[in-house]
Amino acid sequence: MKTDLPQSFRRLEYLPPNYTFGQVELDIALDPARTIVKSHIEVLPGVNHEQDMPLVLQGHELEFVSLRINGQAHRQFELTPETLTIHALPEGGKKAFIVEIICVCIPEKNTSLMGLYVSNGNFFTQCEAEGFRKITYFLDRPDVMARYRVTLRARESECPVLLSNGNLIATEKLPNGWHSAVWEDPFPKPSYLFALVAGKLECIEETITTTSGAKKLLQIWVEPHDLPKTRHAMNSLIASIHWDEKRYGLELDLERFMIVAVSDFNMGAMENKGLNIFNTKFVLAQPETATDADFANIESVVAHEYFHNWTGNRVTCQDWFQLSLKEGLTVFRDQEFSADQMGSESGRAVRRIEDVRLLRQLQFPEDAGPMAHPIRPDEYQEINNFYTVTVYEKGAEVVRMYQTLLGVEGFRKGMDLYFKRHDGQAVTCDDFLAAMADANGRDLTQFKNWYSQAGTPRVKVEETYDAKRKEYQVTLTQSPAKPGDQLFHIPLRMRLLTAQNDQAETLLELTQERQTWTFSGIASRPVLSMNRNFSAPINLDFDQTEDDLLTLFSSDDDAFNRWEAGQKLAMQMILENRLPDEALIKAYRNLLTDPDLDPSFKELALTLPAETYLYEQCKSVDPQKIYAARRAFRHAIASELGIEWAALYQQMQAPGEFSPDAASAGKRALKNLALSMLLEADPAIWAPMAVNQYQNANNMTDRYAALAGLVIHGSKSANACLEDFHQRFADEALVVDKWFALQSSRPPVAHMEPTLNEVKRLREHPAFKMNNPNRVRSVIHAFCLNNPASFHQADGSGYAFWAESVLALDPINPQVAARLARGLDRWRHFAQPYQGHMLSALKQVAACETLSADVKEVVSKALAS
Ligand code: TRP
Ligand code: ZN
């Protein structure tokens, strides 16, 4: 066992910087094997400055070459693997001075994909959160905001395109086939928003005019063969720009805005000022290669990164503990944008259901496990581990609660004040809350607890109805996740459904531990619709009768709660190992045949709660039991509604040319659920129809759905179709990812060998690459994180594979390895023999002497739980 304790960073230990930077000039000569970085930095004393304080710069995996101060070689410095400390500053550092540093980095050896790296022969950077220190020595912290002027140099034949943040100032031909470009960003920014891109890329471009009449150049840069797949991303960008002007009065502040796609990328995308860099997965789409879900994801990620230009870049974070200040707010903004793009109220509701489903499937488990943290964490060892669903998705729910409490207009007033006060600053979550409170004259003191307490609060509902007095009472009791925690300020939308339909929706504000509300003049016992539209991210403890749930499922006018009632009925029955009873089947049938309901809503209503969400309802999880109970329930829905599924499969066909709009996508979703249900009921009978759909589809949604249906239901035709799919799309990396992911996420099938054997073969496939995150995620993460029934085997084979994979990935890419390492977080929550096998796998990983800080934090917190 190693004894050195990992370093923890604490929120309350924040100190403003001793020095800050004014103008920063970078001169970067790009060479995959040896890139030379020269920096020329104007250093100023910071608010915390004291005479003779040294200047401590961060630098990681750099080769130091030279240091000058005010033009003179400077020798009073020390180097450690993480820092460059400069002593004996001119006049003790109390006046501005110039630091010049030369250093070298090696992009082609950089597999971590943080800092400067090479992908398919082109250069890219990723600096958030602490990657800039892998490019040069710097005050690499978000509260140091500087102006950048960047000169890029490269061999013109290898790198015809040279991009950085801001505006292009000059280009020049240089001797020996080199050339250069100078970029200037007029807005001060923290180092994490720096970016450069260089290589053989091409773009589509568009010029638009903003509300104020300014012309803006928009570009999307990709490898030349991908140009035909950029239209949808461009349309999404234009729609985002218009939406932010209209909804928040926020305009694009640069003359030029660029998006670049790269196939080696640790996450989804990055909001570098004026030069967003994206995982290809969130840029490239054509109907033949991308599913409806891919199109929707591209729209929302493009919007997300664009919206960061104001919420993140113009107003940034004081320190990384404030990450949710930009991420929670920006996710909320992209959710609202995407909902508006649906073009109807029912479309908005569908998006809301999808967002909440994600939150509960991923964030609720995180919040109940060893990595639980408040949306504003108090402590971290490795900041990269805190780009979590809690910071992002729960953070967005907290922002949404302001809007619920203050109204859409009140929220807008708060946003306006936030920008008025803090444009150009690095601020905290408290500043955001203060702007919301002050703009609306509201006391939000208690609301602050959402930022400081982890865990999902529970709210218990008790109701009484007095028929004689025609009085209805509801009593709510809140319990924060940890005993001793402060009470929350919880906005709960509710409505009483009555025979007279005479009760309006109201907003209850639960601020005490226990509160009662009385409603009078209620003629008959009402049905309570509580936490409508999921107004608060809580667990509701409410023993509503199955009759009441059926009423809500058939007639609640809040689409979210209508869906929720169906989920709750199914969940309760699955957990009790029951099959759907006659009443529920009838409700399903009515819903499926209701001509007034959106197909996409029907699809959501008939999709069962995910296994991982069912786990959350158990004291001790037996994954195989849950899988079997859920599957049996699904089988019953499939066979009892056989006629309806067959009819829907026909009715939802949309012959003719493919159209990507929301209504058509909804029809496809329901049609493909119907296909999957038919295969569930009888794979032998329906396989030929699925094969037919596979072969004749004119779009990826239909082709992939047919293929997935065949694979998941263990059809004999699956292999031939898989083979065909691979050949057809061998040159389309993102489609090859789908091919891998589908096979790795196949649940157990009775007559087939375990999926793990297949996964091990896929890992040896010539197209598998351990240093491409998308490929790794499509095989290893897909199996360990998205295929619970195959992963959780009683012999522990899945966990052994997990340990081996984490250890193999860690030296290549710690961030991607740490994400995988999260897979055994909840080991204590599982029954034996699973728990015992998980513990040994965790110990095996923890015993490695050379673990990255990323993986070490994850496994040590799991073991300590
Ligand atoms: N800030 C980015 C976003 O939310 C995500 C991000 C953070 C990121 N760190 C990263 C992306 C590292 C890639 C690599 O949009
Ligand atoms: Zn973001």
Image: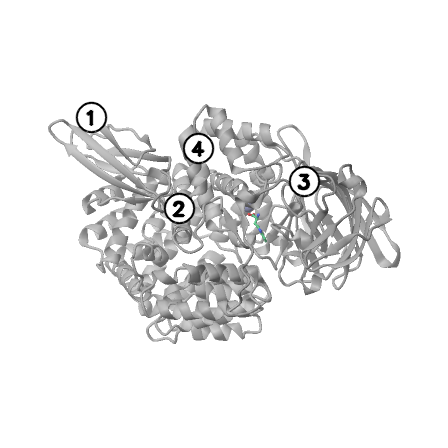
What residue is shown with label 2? 356
Residue 284 found in image quarter: bottom right
Report the disc number at residue 403: 4
Q: Is residue 67 left or right of residue 626?
A: right
Amino acid type, label 4:
Gln
What residue is shown with label 3? 145
Callouts 4 and 1 close, C-beta under 8 Å: no
Residue lying farthest to the right in this orientation: 175
Q: Residue at x 43, y 26 (%)?
A: 442
Alpha carbon separation for disc pair 2 and 3: 36 Å
Alpha carbon separation for disc pair 4 and 1: 29 Å
Q: Earlier in the sequence, mark 4 or mark 1?
A: 4
Q: How is the image coloured?
A: one colour
The x, y position of residue 765, in whole percent, is 54, 74
The x, y position of residue 545, in whole percent, is 19, 45
Q: Earlier in the sequence, mark 4 or mark 3?
A: 3
